[in-house]
Structure formats: structure tokens, C-alpha cells
Image (tube, rainbow, N blue to C red):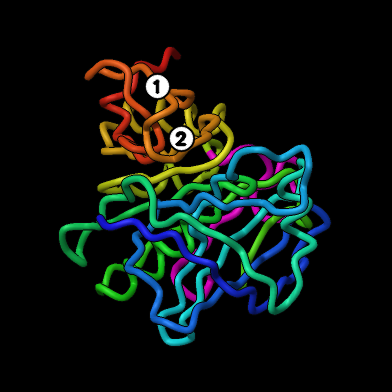
């Protein structure tokens, strides 16, 4: 898939949580084709401690408005600088990078999208593309508290939403793998993105239930092109670069230990 280096224009920056901002980017020309699960490498200007680009998941692509959405957790120097962007600013992006999620083969397939924290970001675009092809997804979203759940109104637009919170302030109490949905219903595929312990728990459940499962890994990345080898993951095919060969992997390829 062809890659582009673009100075995209900031259309808006919305503070959706005390730690998260939603940045909407646009361009004078139509944005390149992007797939759910892919990511962009962002150059952060004006941050003296940020030497490398920052990998950010593609949250959504609004083709009608010619917008690319990035959900950014403002927790480090680079991402905090990104959160300070203003409408009209330029953001240099290398995109689209990596391999995306596998879209269902037919509308009849039952797909569960499981996310936690900022890991919910790529699931929104995946759900939208699934619905576009006639396959309504089910989202299972987890957070510490109700106030930490992100973009619920938008997820509800594209599919059925089930929720867990660790304190029980919304949805069922506990972790995503404790939700009653997993005991009551069956699925053809599970796709998950979020904290590594959560993804490993979802992967264990998937193996036990004999359900095909894809995970989006969040290894530390630098170049985004497979050149620096800092994001290597051990797999059944040897050491692979998460940025180039992933970030989406079928769990059958991973050598995760339970």
C-alpha cells in the first residue's frame, strides 16, 4: 500500500477526557485510502525532548468531510505537545502504515471488537467499515470507571455496545473477559486492542473457545517502516517488526506465554 508524507491541517482539537484529545485533520486533496488497524507516524514540532515520530492509531476516516481522526493520550512530552495544537496548524504525518484488521468475509459473520483505554481508537473505524458492508459489530469496551469510557455515543452509532468498568460505575463490574456476553453468545472472530494484559486475557479466552482472534500490538516503535528493529515481536515465523508486519497479528502467530 502506497505511503504518503503529508502536512495535514488541523481542523479541530477536542478535549474529550482529562487525558485524551480528539484531533481531526484534513487536506486540500482527498486523503489517501486507509484501513482499520493501520496507524500514522506523527512528527512533533516544538518539543525539545521528542526526537522521534509518534505512532498514533487511525481512529476514524470521515470520507465525506475528508477528515482523519486521531485519538491521542496526552501522557508524554510529545503527545502533550500534540494536545496543544490549534485549528489551522500543520501536522506532518507519514501514512498509512502497517497492516490492518481482517474484514469479515460476509455480512453473516459475528465479530466482537474488544477494547480498553486508548486501545478503543482503531475499533471505531473498523466498526464503521463493517457496518458499511452490512455486518453489524458488537463492541465490548472496558475502562476503570464510567468517566474513562471514550466515544460511547459514536460506538453506539455503528454497533451494539457492551461495557465493563472495574468499579461497576457503568455496565458490568470487572474486566472485559468477565462480561456475561462471553458466556451467553458465540462469535466467529474477536478483534482486540488495548493494554497488553487485557489482550492476553482476550487471547486466552479465544483459544479456549476456539474463536479466531486478532490483536493489535502496541510495541514501542520509532521508524514505523521496519528499519530500526526496535518493535520486534517473537512469532512462529521468527522475529517480526510490529510496525511493518503488524501491528495486527492473528494470535496463532504469537508466542505469548499464559
Q: In the picture, residue 86 is in which quadrant?
A: bottom right
Q: Residue at x 38, y 58 (%)?
A: 36
Q: In the picture, residue 167 is in which quadrant?
A: top right
Q: Percent from the top left, x then y, of residue 141?
A: 57, 51
Q: Percent from the top left, x then y, of residue 162?
A: 54, 57
Q: Percent from the top left, x then y, of residue 205?
A: 40, 30
In this view, 155 is above or below 2: below
Number of other residues with Cα within 10 Å of mark 2, as a class: few under 14, some 14 to 19, many 20 or more: many
Asked if labels 2 and 1 touch by Cβ distance under 8 angstroms, the answer is: yes
Instruction: Answer whether residue 185 is magenta in the image.
Output: no
Residue named by callout 1: 233
Instruction: Answer whether residue 157 is magenta in the image.
Output: yes
Residue range (magenta): 154-176
Residue 169 visible in the picture: no
Q: Residue at x 32, y 50 (%)?
A: 101
In this view, 156 is above or below 114: below
Indicate the secondary structure of the residue bearing disc 2.
Answer: loop
Decide if residue 37 is on the left or right side of residue 72. left
Residue named by callout 2: 217
Q: Residue at x 30, y 48 (%)?
A: 187
Amino acid at each position: 500500500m502506497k505511503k504518503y508524507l503529508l502536512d495535514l491541517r488541523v481542523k479541530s482539537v477536542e478535549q474529550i477526557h482529562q487525558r485524551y484529545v480528539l484531533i481531526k485533520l484534513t487536506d486540500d486533496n482527498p486523503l489517501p485510502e486507509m484501513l482499520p488497524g493501520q496507524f500514522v507516524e506523527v512528527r512533533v514540532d516544538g518539543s525539545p525532548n521528542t526526537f522521534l515520530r509518534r505512532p498514533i492509531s487511525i481512529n476514524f476516516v470521515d470520507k465525506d468531510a475528508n477528515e482523519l481522526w486521531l485519538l491521542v493520550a496526552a501522557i508524554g512530552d510529545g503527545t502533550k505537545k500534540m494536545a496543544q495544537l490549534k485549528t489551522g496548524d500543520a501536522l506532518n504525518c507519514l501514512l498509512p502504515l502497517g497492516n490492518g484488521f481482517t474484514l469479515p468475509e460476509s455480512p453473516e459473520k459475528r465479530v466482537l471488537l474488544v477494547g480498553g483505554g486508548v486501545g478503543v481508537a482503531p475499533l471505531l473505524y473498523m466498526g464503521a467499515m463493517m457496518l458499511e458492508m452490512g455486518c453489524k459489530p458488537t463492541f465490548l469496551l472496558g475502562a476503570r470507571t464510567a468517566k474513562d469510557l471514550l466515544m460511547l455515543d459514536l460506538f453506539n452509532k455503528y454497533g451494539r455496545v457492551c461495557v465493563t468498568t472495574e468499579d461497576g460505575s457503568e455496565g458490568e463490574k470487572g474486566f472485559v473477559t468477565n462480561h456475561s456476553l462471553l458466556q451467553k453468545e458465540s462469535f466467529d472472530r474477536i478483534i482486540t486492542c488495548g493494554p497488553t494484559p487485557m489482550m492476553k486475557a482476550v487471547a486466552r479466552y479465544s483459544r479456549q473457545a476456539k474463536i479466531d482472534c486478532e490483536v493489535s500490538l502496541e510495541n514501542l516503535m520509532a521508524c514505523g517502516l521496519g528499519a530500526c528493529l526496535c518493535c520486534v515481536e517473537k512469532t512462529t515465523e521468527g522475529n517480526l517488526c510490529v510496525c511493518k508486519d503488524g501491528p495486527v497479528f492473528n494470535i496463532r502467530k504469537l508466542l505469548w506465554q499464559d
